[in-house]
Each structure stands twice: as C-alpha cells, then as structure tokens.
Image (cartoon, grey):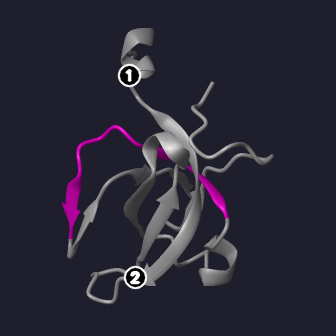
Amino acid sequence: METIEWADFARVELRVGTVVELTELPQARRPAWVMIVDFGAELGMKKSSARITDLYDRESLLGKQVVAVVNFPPKQIGQIMSECLVTGFYQDGGAVVLAVPDQPVPNGARLA
C-alpha cells in the first residue's frame, strides 16, 4: 500500500449531502442511479451517478445523507456529467454499501 502525506489527504473535500432527487440511468451497461445531492448553501446541488441498485431502491435513497468527494473535476459518465463522487465500500459480491454518517449532520459538513 502506498502511503500519502497529510497534505494529500487534506486536499480531498469529503462532504455530507442529502439525496433529494433520483432517476434511473437505463442506458448504462450496469444499472445505476443518477442522484441529485444537496450539499447546503455553500456548495448547492451536485449530480452523481452511482451503481448502487443492488442494495438501494428509491425509497431507501431519497432523503438519505451520503458522503461524497466534491472537489474532483466534473466527469462524463455515460449520458450524464458527474459533479461529485458518492463514496462506498464493495462487498464480496461486488455490491456497494454507501459510506454514510450514523447521525444527522448539516448538509455540506466536511469530514473531520
């Protein structure tokens, strides 16, 4: 495993936001959600695509707080321009479990 300096990690903006809108991405090779995430007044709404349909349906995602990297440059993913990277962890079978706070925090809160 490669080690990094604290300054490298400090440059990554990991913020909490609430999923406020979801649409399916039917043209994707693997099923995915297009999410609009509210990161509060400072950052506003950002769009992301996530292949998390194995474990998350519309009802479980709407209103859920997620942790995302918000300072990557926008990236074209299929038909959408992703503006943030919602984070998670792979299970053995390949499904992604979202990284989420275990208590409510303000939208836009930065990882401490």
The single residue placed furthest to the bottom in the displayed view is 26
Report x, y in % for residue 48: 38, 62
Q: Is residue 46 above or below residue 40?
A: below
Span highlighted in magenta in the image: 64-77
Which quadrant, please, contains the C terminus? top right
In the rendered structure, which amino acid carries the disc numbered 1?
A: Arg
Which residue lies under the disc numbered 2?
Answer: 31
| Spatial separation of the CA atoms under disc 2 and disc 1 | 31 Å
Amino acid carrying label 2: it is Pro
Q: Examine the image and state in which quarter residue 92 appears.
A: bottom right
Per the image, label 2 sits on a secondary structure element best described as: loop
Between disc 2 and disc 1, the foreground one is: 1
Q: Residue at x 40, y 24 (%)?
A: 1
Can the viewer see residue 102? yes
Residue 91 at least partly seen: no
Q: What is the number of callouts on the image?
A: 2
Query: On the image, which quarter does residue 111 sit in?
Result: top right
Q: Residue furthest right?
A: 103
**Residue at x 68% of width, y 75% of height:** 60
